[in-house]
Amino acid sequence: MIKSLFLGQHRQKLVTLAFWLLVLGTYVYYGQANDLTLADSVENIAILLTTSAVGPLLYIIIYWLRPLIFSQPRY
């Protein structure tokens, strides 16, 4: 009962936490797999997002997920 109540009250926060952990984990994996420094990896990601179709597509996906990812919790 208590566990289901907790999940019911904090479901959106847990989904948001999982999303940001996935983003952070993917970033760390990318940097380590390619043996990049922080500056190098940021530069590579910026180049990828500005010179290919990935940037606008990622923008659309983030805008679509925005209510879930960036919303304020309701009390």
Image (spheres, helix red, strand yellow):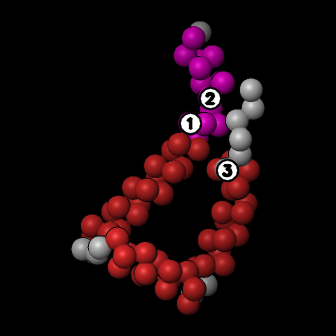
- Asked if disc 2 and disc 3 are in contact, CB closer than 8 Å, the reply is no
Q: State the CA–CA distance, disc 2 to disc 3.
A: 15 Å
In the figure, 57 relative to 12: above or below?
below
In the figure, 69 relative to 6: above or below?
below
Q: Crowdedness of circle 1 by 10 Å Cα count: few (<14), some, many (20+)?
A: few
- Which of the 4 quarters of the picture holds residue 2? top right
> What residue did someone put label 3 on?
70
| Depth check, front residue: 49 or 4 | 49
- Asked if disc 1 and disc 2 are in contact, CB closer than 8 Å, the reply is yes
In the figure, 63 relative to 42: above or below?
above
Mark 1 falls on what kind of element? helix
**22 horizontally vs 75: left or right:** left
Q: Amino acid at mark 2?
A: His
> What residue did someone put label 1 on?
14
Q: Which numbered disc, 1 or 3, marks the residue that appears first in the sequence?
A: 1
> What residue did someone put label 2 on?
10
Quarter of the image that includes the C terminus: top right
Q: Amino acid at mark 1?
A: Leu
Q: Which residues are magenta?
A: 2-15
- Which of the 4 quarters of the picture holds residue 24? bottom left
